[in-house]
Image (spheres, grey):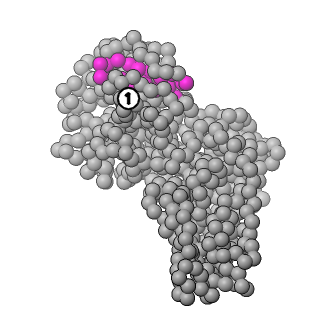
Amino acid sequence: MRARRTVPAAGLVVLALVLSACAGIPGTGRVQSASVDDDDAASAPRYAPAGPRAGSTPDQIVRGYLDAMLAYPVSTGTAARFLSPEARLTWQSQEHTTVYADQRLSVVPTRGLDNGPSDDGSVVELRATRQARLDAQGRYEPGGDDLTTRFRLTRVKGQWRIVNPPSGTLVTSKFFEDYYRPYSLWFFDRPGRRLVPEVVHLVAGERLASSLATSLSIGPEDDSALRTFLEPGDGLRPSVPVDEEGLADVELAEEVASRSESERERLLAQLVRTLGQVPDVRSVRVTAGTTRLAPDESRSSGLTSRYDPSGSGPRVYAVVRGRLREVTTDGVEPVAGAWGRSTQGFSRVAVGDAGVAGLADDGSGVRVTDRLGNDPRTVPASRLVALTWDSAGILWIVDRPSGSTRVRTVRGDEVTTVPAGPLAALDVSSFAVSPDGGHFAVTDGSDGVRVGSVRRGDTEEAVVALLAPRRVVRRAERPASVRWFDGTHVGFLASTQVGDQVHSAAIDGSDRSGGLTGAEPLLPDVGVDQLAIGPGARPPVWAVDAKGRLWYRPVGQSWLISDQGPVGGLSSSP
């Protein structure tokens, strides 16, 4: 199943306050927002399927029922007309959505008739391939298995009607490709300091603002890792109208107005960031009963940016001829301090706002200093896998002593071993933390890439545990050097018939591209083994090959080779 990658929507305007009670949509920052082809979906042909016709056979009724669920704008009213009166009352159409392909319908013999319906009942069987399943919020679960559903029909006033509709709705893969788009629901980490996205797939179009707000109000998938300030009991009005000026109007229960300023501000940040993905939305007004909620004018433009840790995006660094350098699209630049003068026998180096860390050439330990190379201390390591800083200024050290994966964090002088759960048993070969610090990604020596959640403390950003990762990429040959394009997409290297290439994948497994199937230029077959990703919606990418040569792919251009070298320790800061 291929879904469309999300990028920041063009044309979002920063507004201060509308009527002094509206939060403006931020126009900067690494926002996972509306898909580039949202307008295509919004302008797609409307389809109003026909209801059941008198005299229809059982298989025609089932075909009509399946076709009715392809209505656009989405509606289940016509589909319900194919059901018996009792089934209409019990059908849970909102429970989930199944995406299927290769549909085959057949009438199952019943008593009284070898090849068709009896007078009192009939059964029609649907066989198809289940390509995906979306839960009530739109979260994507990859499929690939067989789907078999038997519809029982009975006569109602002489006409066949379905008596046992499966819960949820059924849509074809073409309908999914044509009308659904990926969006982000924005929640907070447990300390309430950073916004973290969760990917959902919703129907684009005029009802998108309402769908996003409703999905957001249900809450995060795992509230042990994320939290929300828009509670399910906050009385969200199901409809979120957007007027001609691009003002989205959100109504909540009066009780929300009594919450603390901090809680209200975070609630607004979630709504503004989430609804900002709607192409027509320029500002958001939130009302709790008769009270309008919004920050004051001087703070409105920073409402979401203060909770966005990525800022202008990651910076890329490398060890060039024994010196730490920042790698840019214009070349390499010196880094201030001792590391910029010499890496002193430390081959792999990671840079963050809080400091610099390097692995000793003999692999025995990690030296940690401030940005200028002062206040050094050493953390023992064995068979290092990853060395990376996160947006909270925490250093992650992942290694494999005694054949099991160990994860430790360094914060100041405190070194903490993090409970890694199932990750400990995996043969982890690369590891990376997302820009928001809410997720991690690994390659594990198999044919896939896994993504899991980071659990932090409720009052501080210390890492408490790593939750079990899920496989989001399958059947990749020798995946390695996993990195993050943004909060919802990972990048990694994988072998192809033309050598190692850069691939990308959505963190819910809905989208994968790269290599021979991607639109980006291919790398020469030079044995690249290190990857780094720069800032931006379409970021530049760097790689280092087996000879220590630095390769660079500018946006929209072919790969270039740098005259810098030898290069090692390629890494990116949060």
| Residue 542 shown in magenta | yes
Question: Residue at the location (50% across, 44% down)?
Answer: 511
Question: Residue at the location (49% across, 65% down)?
Answer: 147
Q: How many marks?
A: 1
Position above or below: 156 against 212? below
Q: Nearer the viewer, residue 312 or 375?
A: 312
Q: Identity of the amino acid at label 1?
A: Val
Question: Residue at the location (49% across, 68% down)?
Answer: 148
Q: Answer with left or right where residue 82 lies relative to residue 152.
A: right
Q: Return the x and y of residue 514 as percentages of the image width and height.
A: 46, 35
Task: Give the structural element (helix, strand or loop) at label 1.
Answer: loop
Q: Return the x and y of residue 94 as percentages of the image width and height.
A: 61, 66
Q: Residues within 10 Å of mark 1 (few under 14, many from 20)?
A: few
Quadrant of res 276:
top right
Position above or below: 387 against 208? above
- Quadrant containing the C terminus in the rendered view: top left
Residue 351 visible within the image: no
Question: Residue at the location (71% across, 56% down)?
Answer: 72
| Residue 456 shown in magenta | no
Q: Answer with left or right where residue 153 lies relative to residue 190.
A: right
Q: Which residue is mark 1?
A: 498
Position above or below: 387 against 448? above
Give the magenta range.
539-556
